[in-house]
Image (tube, helix red, strand yellow):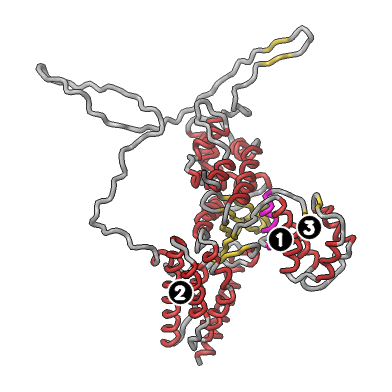
Amino acid sequence: MARLLGKLAELERTVAEQREEIARLKGLKGRPDIKPSGMDKATEPTKPDRQEKHPGRGKVRPRVSVEDRVLTAAAPTGSRFKGYETYLVQELVLSVHAIRYLRERWVTPDGQTIVAPLPEGTRGHFGPDLRRFVLMQYHQGQSTLPRLTALLQSVGLSISKREVQRLLTEKQDGFLDEARDVLRAGLQTSPWVSVDDTGARHQAANGFCTQIGNDRFTWFGTRPSKSRLNFLDLLRAGETDFVLNPAAFDYMRSHALSASLIARLAAQPETAFAGQAAWSTHLDRLGFTGLSVTPAPVQIATEAAIWGSIHAHDFLRDAVVLSDDAGQFAVGQHALCWVHAERLVHKLDAFTDLHHAAQQHVRKLIWNFYADLKAYRANPGKSRRLALRARFDRIFRRRTGFATLDRLLARLHANKAELLMVLDRPETPLHTNGSENDIRCQVTRRKVSAGTRSDRGRDCRDAFLGLAKTCSKLGVAFWDYLGSRLHIPAQRVIPPLPSLVRCRGHPA
């Protein structure tokens, strides 16, 4: 009876997943998510007693110069002056300022015309302060285009929705390049990166936005596919070459490409290809495109050549890739999120008291093990590492009598190397909470503005959201960053974000 109930639960779960996918494709609201188990928070160290005195927020310190104004009081005759009592008030001034520049024109003796240049930072008929305000409100403030246009018009600006759209997407090459360089700096200097993805809409079609980042940087890329080939292409950080090197051939062997095909590639003198066209021509010449075997030779060889390109550009050399067990992210040194692993046990349907007791007992064992992994990260040691490995086997090789739970434990045990990556690399986090927090801004943007219509708009959205997250992690105000890049007078100079990412990766 219990086995039939288990099969019925699996069928119901499959139907629910199919209904959710149909609803997502139709643009309807999906089913609510199951509440998190709370394992990560429950294993945090206990907080101090509430009765202890906590430090206050401190004095208000404005980031701008303070203007002093003296307020007089009507004191009766004979009163003594006792100085001043300070009272600080912060104010925001929104006003429209239109400037008509009278640019001198001169004609040189040889007939050339010289016109006085515009002030630095002036591009088009809208000033840099307005451009900064628009970028800040739209990307970090998550405003919509119609609302932002209405706000600007209400304070007196003569501007249309189309002109606001141009301020968001046109002449942004510098920001796009810096976002790409942030990714390159992060991949070259980080000991680990955490990745995740979410749904996205572009040109009225479903796509996927992938997040790559850690505690120093964040980068987003939206593409039509979420395949491993797409993920590897994103890890190239804008490079387009294909490289056959030892890393590429190791990838082919680990993904079961035929030894004869690997030898065919290795025998050729060409090892680097400038782009997709040159690489496809090379595979066609070697007879790869006509083969219909498993695994697909063209796909594996292409993935391997991109992996070779990643290593050739010194990206992700010794870094760990931390993910939630989505198949496309399993590249290189791969680690798995413990919160997602425990969630599988948490979501199991138990139909008898014995099954429920077994489920809760296993969850308790996992929670205790997770707490000890946290302690190991803070103070790693060889003896503790060996003990934790043996304890992992005891937990995930046990047989509970609950068939579904036993199969799940066996599946998790098969991922032992990825779940215990932290034992060899203690700097690697145990969960992907950072990625989920980062990608939340993309989810909000999708809910607020649906999708993008042009590739330029998609790239600008991804770049600015990633730059805003990176600024926050580096302790840089996004407002100051925009002011520095737009050359606003008297604005504090913000160094290039890639250099700050590299400095955090190689502390002095």
Q: Does residue 243 appear left or right of residue 408 in this picture?
A: right
- Above or below residue 60? Residue 126 is above
Residue at 57%, 55% (x, y): give it.
Answer: 191
In this rendering, which labeled residue sits more in front, label 1 or label 3? Answer: 3
Please name the amino acid that badge 1 sits on. Answer: Leu
Distance from the alpha carbon under mark 3 to that under mark 2: 42 Å
Question: Which residue, given by chain and number where applicable, does mark 2 sit on?
Answer: 366
Residue at 60%, 51% (x, y): give it.
Answer: 220
Can the viewer see residue 60?
yes
Which span of residues is magenta-colored? 227-237
Distance from the alpha carbon under mark 1 to that under mark 3: 16 Å
Please provide percent x and percent y for residue 350: 46, 83
Residue 135 covered by magenta stretch: no
For numbered disc 3, what is the local secondary structure?
loop
* Dot label at residue 244: 3
Can the viewer see residue 432?
no
Between 55 and 10, the one lying in front of the other is: 55
Please provide percent x and percent y for residue 246: 75, 60
Instruction: Give the mark nearest the N terminus, 1 or 2.
Output: 1
Residue at 36%, 27% (x, y): give it.
Answer: 66
* Dot label at residue 229: 1
| Quadrant of residue 365 within the rendered picture | bottom left
Please provide percent x and percent y for residue 482: 54, 36
